[in-house]
Amino acid sequence: MRNTDNMELKTYILNNLKKVESTDTYVFGIREEKMVKACIVENASDILPLVTVCEAVASSKGTGFKVRMWNSNEAFKIIREYARETITLCSVAEFEAGFKAWRASGNNGNRGNYFEPTFCGVTGAEMNTNPIAKCTECGDVRLNGEELQLKLWNATVISQEQVERFMERA
């Protein structure tokens, strides 16, 4: 079972994220049966408390906290249950090989960054033209006119420091 420490802090962070984010429709990248799947979930803030963990992290202001995706089959099952649509993107082996080739071609991003063009390539979604846009401004991609926020397994959803900075500007 997952660690339930910092539940109040996780609730605080996620409630404030909901107040400032530009979209509450997420695409969660999960692994299931050796495949990478994209699960589109509307009202994702309803399930984020169930599929995330809150943990300490070093920040520019000292020690802070972040909320990240809970990388487990139990979390993936919850995501699948709430998904309005699930799209198989590729095998995990193909994803990992593609990620390695992507990195070798000069990209410095992580698997979450690679998940975006993978999702777009399969679905025809358009990547955000501003790669450093904040979640308060727009989603990561647009599919059929809908802004979507993408999160791959184990990804950081948001840090306490980020959400507090966004709240100050709201």
Image (spheres, rainbow, N blue to C red):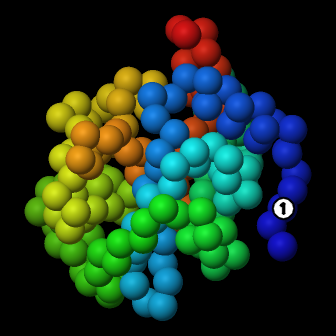
Please give left or right for residue 110 compared with residue 46 in the image. left
Q: Is residue 29 visible?
A: no
At mark 1, the secondary structure is loop
Residue 39 placed where, x, y %? Answer: 45, 65
Give the vertical position of 85 relative to 134 (above or below).
below
- Crowding at label 1, few (<14), some or many (≥20) Cα neighbours within 10 Å? few
Q: Is residue 148 left or right of residue 131?
A: right
- At horizontal 21% and vertical 58% (from top left) the residue drawn is 120
- In the image, 110: left or right of 156? left
Residue at the disc numbered 1: 3
Residue 56, placed above or below residue 98 = above
Q: Residue furthest left?
A: 105
Write the residue at 33% across / 85% down. Answer: 91
Q: Residue furthest bottom?
A: 33
Q: Quadrant of the C terminus?
A: top right
Q: Where residue 167 sits: x, y (%)? A: 61, 15
Percent x, y of residue 132? 31, 32
Viewer-side residue, 12 vs 64: 12
Amino acid type shown at disc 1 = Asn
Which residue is pictured at 51% across the width and 55% down the height? 41
Q: What residue is at 34 percent from the left and 39 percent from the top?
A: 147
